[in-house]
Image: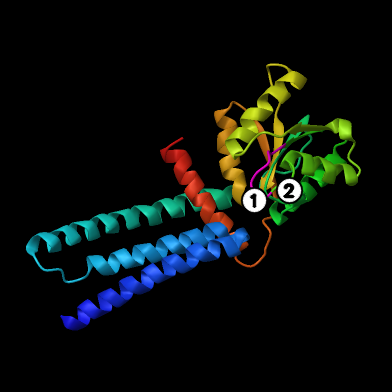
Amino acid sequence: MACKKTACLWGASLGLGACVLFSLLRNAFLGLSFLMMLCAALGAFIALLFLLFYPWKGKGARLFCQTIRRFLLVCAICGVLSFAALEGAVFAHAGGDPPMETPAVIVLGAGLYGETPSASLASRLHTAHAYLDAYPDTLALLSGGQGPGESIPEALAMARWLSQKGIEPDRLLLEDRSTSTRENLVNCLPLLKDRFGATLPEITLVTNDFHLYRAKLLAVDLGLSVRLLSAETPQIGLVPLSLYLREYFSLLKYYLLD
């Protein structure tokens, strides 16, 4: 019994230590901030598990811990099943649709470092540039506001990047107020209606492969008919893992809360 108590206390201490460590590392590795947050939450969860298996005195305390353990087991099973289903849908949509000319393309924003596009945004811009170059009559709606650590709105940074690559400025429409994927699409609707009227044509949506499924869901919710154009997720260290894990929680929020 003494050994079990010691092991549980050590396990709880290590879990809490990991929680604190990864919380601090979040600020040091901004590109992996979500992964650091997830690791911190995992550390806290491990600490909780060790405390739930601690041989507490009293029948009431033991029954309480047993009930919580069973509840967490059910949550874990549901989590595994939902993760498999949602990530399966993400991977099924990751390739997008074959490119086809549409009157407009929406390029969804992503992070900037000051005024410099992040790797994810650069990938979207390369994909959008190739599409716009292939279809010179297509307009581009560049959607993204200014977030923390960004010197200018993402839409403006995208416009500068595409202009430098030879895309005519009069083909670029900027939506520079949005702070989320849903706002990207909601704020683009008036611009689309100004150009094409109340009955909107099919448009092309450009974003990274991990993001296509949720972007399509949100677009359909707004009554948009979209084709998906996939930009590769940057293969930099643990960045893809972090992005795909974050997308699972974003989809979970979409289905449960939105």
Q: Position of residue 25 (x, y in %)?
A: 54, 66
User: What colouring method underlies this structural image?
Assistant: rainbow
Nearer the viewer's eye, disc 2 or disc 1? 2
The amino acid at mark 1 is Asp
Is residue 88 visible to the viewer in this orientation of the structure? Answer: no
Look at the image and give the residue range highlighted in magenta. Answer: 143-149
Determine whether the residue tagged by mark 2 lies in a helix, strand or loop. Answer: helix
Residue drawn where x is 28% and y is 69% of the image: 50
Q: Tag on residue 209?
A: 1
Which quadrant, please, contains the N terminus? bottom left
Asked whether, in this view, residue 155 is left or right of residue 23, the answer is: right
| Foreground of the two, 73 or 93 | 73
Q: Position of residue 188 (x, y in %)?
A: 68, 29
Residue 55 picture quarter? bottom left
Residue behind mark 2: 124
Residue 180 picture quarter? top right
User: Taking 79 as reference, is 3 above or below it?
Assistant: below
Q: Position of residue 91 (x, y in %)?
A: 57, 53
Determine whether the residue tagged by mark 1 lies in a helix, strand or loop. Answer: helix
Q: In the displayed image of the protein, which residue is found farthest to the left? A: 59
Q: In the displayed image of the protein, which residue is found farthest to the top? A: 198
